[in-house]
Image (cartoon, grey):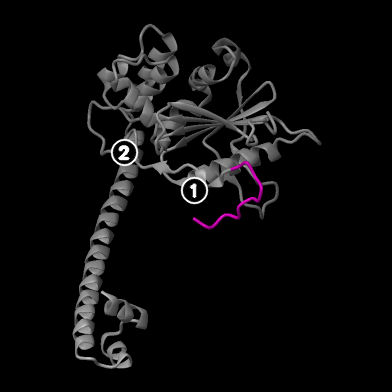
């Protein structure tokens, strides 16, 4: 990461920027018959949340996040364009996962399956682009960014956190820009801890990330929409088009993982060889020092720096 210019006489501690934990909640594995495709898969997420006929599901999710009832959301929520930043043909456009609007408030829901700090910065750019694109004359519309993260931050144990622009005293700069981070790995961990009771939002999301069909049904309870959500996932998981897209995503991730392993082995061998050569040079230099050979000759014969050789003298 690039060095950040620190603020003088500031209450903000910029060294406390959070780090990603690479422990993921739902891995992309090769599809097996009888399992379900989790919503962390791009195609499954679009199938369940981005289609007009499935508007119940984003309404249900948002009813747990917003202070608005499911019934009101179902009546007034509508899909809007999920592309930002393109007003002219030559400009680059950016496509979000799902953008909806209710009562003048724009809400972007992103499924973040890639555990990268770059994703956090990208989502911030979505927040600002949506805000700019929806500007009405001089007035900016409120924007809420909901991040469904298939990763969490180091040391973070909560399943949901809310953020906004504020100062070191906790005073909010604007109420029109809000970020809601939901950590799927921590929801999964919580469901395995029998001492903790799951919230309705956590049950709903577990239905979407639990690959085992029978296990997913346990979270439904008597909720009609959750049952429909589960049935839609089961039905969609039997569609060849989705299975094919899922396996393609798995293959690409597996290839990347295997390539990473291969590159890691190569780098390890290379690093080991370099360490071995360096150790040999140090041994030769020590012998030459004992024989009182001139410093410039030792540098020439071993390739070590003057500082490295002088340090050997002190050992």
Dominant SS in magenta: loop
Q: Is residue 105 left or right of residue 301?
A: right
Where residue 310 appears, as percent x and y from the top left, is 32, 80
Label 2: how many residues lie within 10 Å, few (<14), some (14-19) or many (20+)?
some
* Residue in view at x 33 percent, y 92 percent: 296
Magenta span? 1-12
Where 1 falls versus 109 (above or below)?
A: below
Tell me the tag on residue 223: none
The residue singled out by tag 1 in the image is 118
- For label 2, the SS is loop
* Residue in view at x 31 percent, y 19 percent: 216
Figure disc tally: 2
Q: Disc 1 to disc 2, how far (Cα)?
A: 20 Å
Q: Is residue 197 left or right of residue 17?
A: left
Question: Sequence order check: which comes first, mark 1 or mark 2?
Answer: 2
- For label 1, the SS is helix
Where residue 52 appears, as percent x and y from the top left, is 53, 24
Label 1: how many residues lie within 10 Å, few (<14), some (14-19) or many (20+)?
few
Tell me the tag on residue 28: 2
Q: Nearer the viewer, residue 71 or 280?
A: 280
Q: Nearer the viewer, residue 135 or 156?
A: 156
Q: Nearer the viewer, residue 98 or 118?
A: 118
Mark 1 or 2: the one toward you: 1
């Amino acid at each position: 990461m690039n060095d950040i210019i620190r603020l003088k006489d500031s209450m903000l501690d910029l060294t406390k920027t959070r780090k990603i934990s690479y422990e993921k909640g739902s891995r992309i594995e090769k599809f097996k018959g009888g399992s379900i495709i989790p919503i962390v898969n791009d195609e499954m997420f679009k199938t369940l949340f981005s289609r007009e006929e499935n508007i119940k599901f984003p309404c249900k999710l948002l009813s747990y996040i917003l202070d608005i009832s499911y019934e009101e959301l179902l009546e007034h929520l509508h899909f809007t364009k999920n592309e930002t930043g393109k007003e002219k043909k030559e400009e680059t456009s950016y496509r979000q996962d799902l953008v909806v609007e209710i009562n003048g408030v724009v809400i972007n829901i992103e499924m973040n399956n890639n555990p990268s700090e770059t994703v956090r910065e990208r989502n911030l750019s979505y927040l600002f682009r949506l805000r700019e694109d929806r500007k009405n004359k001089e007035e900016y519309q409120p924007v809420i960014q909901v991040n469904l993260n298939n990763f969490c931050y180091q040391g973070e144990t909560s399943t949901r956190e809310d953020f906004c622009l504020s100062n070191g005293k906790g005073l909010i700069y604007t109420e029109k820009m809000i970020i809601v981070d939901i950590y799927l790995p921590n929801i999964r961990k919580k469901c395995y801890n029998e001492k903790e009771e799951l919230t309705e939002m956590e049950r709903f999301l577990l239905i979407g990330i639990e690959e085992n069909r029978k296990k997913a049904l346990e979270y439904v309870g008597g909720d009609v929409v959750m049952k429909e959500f589960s049935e839609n996932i089961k039905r969609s998981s039997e569609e060849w088009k989705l299975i094919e897209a899922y396996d393609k995503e798995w293959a690409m991730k597996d290839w990347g993982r295997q390539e990473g392993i291969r590159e890691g082995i190569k780098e390890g061998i290379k690093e080991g060889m370099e360490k071995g050569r360096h150790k040999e040079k140090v041994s030769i230099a020590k012998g030459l020092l004992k024989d009182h050979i001139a410093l410039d000759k030792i540098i020439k014969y071993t390739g070590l720096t003057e500082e490295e050789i002088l340090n050997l003298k002190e050992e």
